[in-house]
Image (spheres, rainbow, N blue to C red):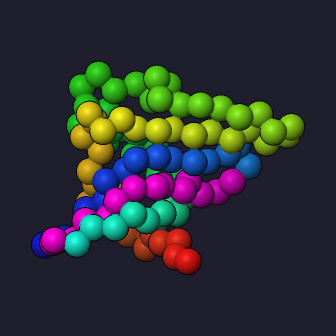
């Protein structure tokens, strides 16, 4: 069985090159909370997948913006009602650049 990532939240800002995805990683009977870093260039593809999987999804309904001077921080919290499950291949895209998992 392949790993699936259930996306709960996205964090990014207007100066960063990566998006931090927060969610639950599922593999067979195991599941755990995790954070994954993804290139910002993949953000549009991820939003397109969310729109494809959820007929009435609009990113702006779930986005909060925080202006911190010269940096604007964006936070997207996705409700549990949405289909927000992705395979590793969907997250990585065709380039297959490995994602970085944030571990403590």
- Residue 80 located within the stretch drawn in magenta: no
Most foreground residue, 78 or 59: 78
Residue 69 location in percent, x, y? 86, 37
Answer left or right for 54 relative to 19: left
Q: In this picture, is 2 found above or below 83?
A: below
Residue at image coords 31%, 32%: 51
Query: Is 52 on the left or on the right of 22, as rendered?
Result: left
Residue 12: image location, x then y, percent: 61, 48
Residue 39 figure quarter = bottom right
Residue 7 placement (x, y as % from top left): 37, 50
The residue lying toward the viewer, choosing from 95 and 48, is: 48
Where residue 104 sits, quadrant-wise, is bottom right
Residue 58 % position (x, y): 40, 25
Q: Which residues are magenta?
A: 16-29
* Res 95 seen here: no
- Residue at image point 30% right, 39% down: 80
Q: Is residue 65 above or below residue 19?
A: above
Residue at image location 43% in from the left, 73% down from the top: 98
Q: Is residue 15 visible to us here?
A: yes
In the displayed structure image, the side of residue 28 where residue 23 appears, left or right: right
Question: Measuring 71% from the left and 34% from the top, which residue is drawn there?
Answer: 66
């Amino acid at each position: 069985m392949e790993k699936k990532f259930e996306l709960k939240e996205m964090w990014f800002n207007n100066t960063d090159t990566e998006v931090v995805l927060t969610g639950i990683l599922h593999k067979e009977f195991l599941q755990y909370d995790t954070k994954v870093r993804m290139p910002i260039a993949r953000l549009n593809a991820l939003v397109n997948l969310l729109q494809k999987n959820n007929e009435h999804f609009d990113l702006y309904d779930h986005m909060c913006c925080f202006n911190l001077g010269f940096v604007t921080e964006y936070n997207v919290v996705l409700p549990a009602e949405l289909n927000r499950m992705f395979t590793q291949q969907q997250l990585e895209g065709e380039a297959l650049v490995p994602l970085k998992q944030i571990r403590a």
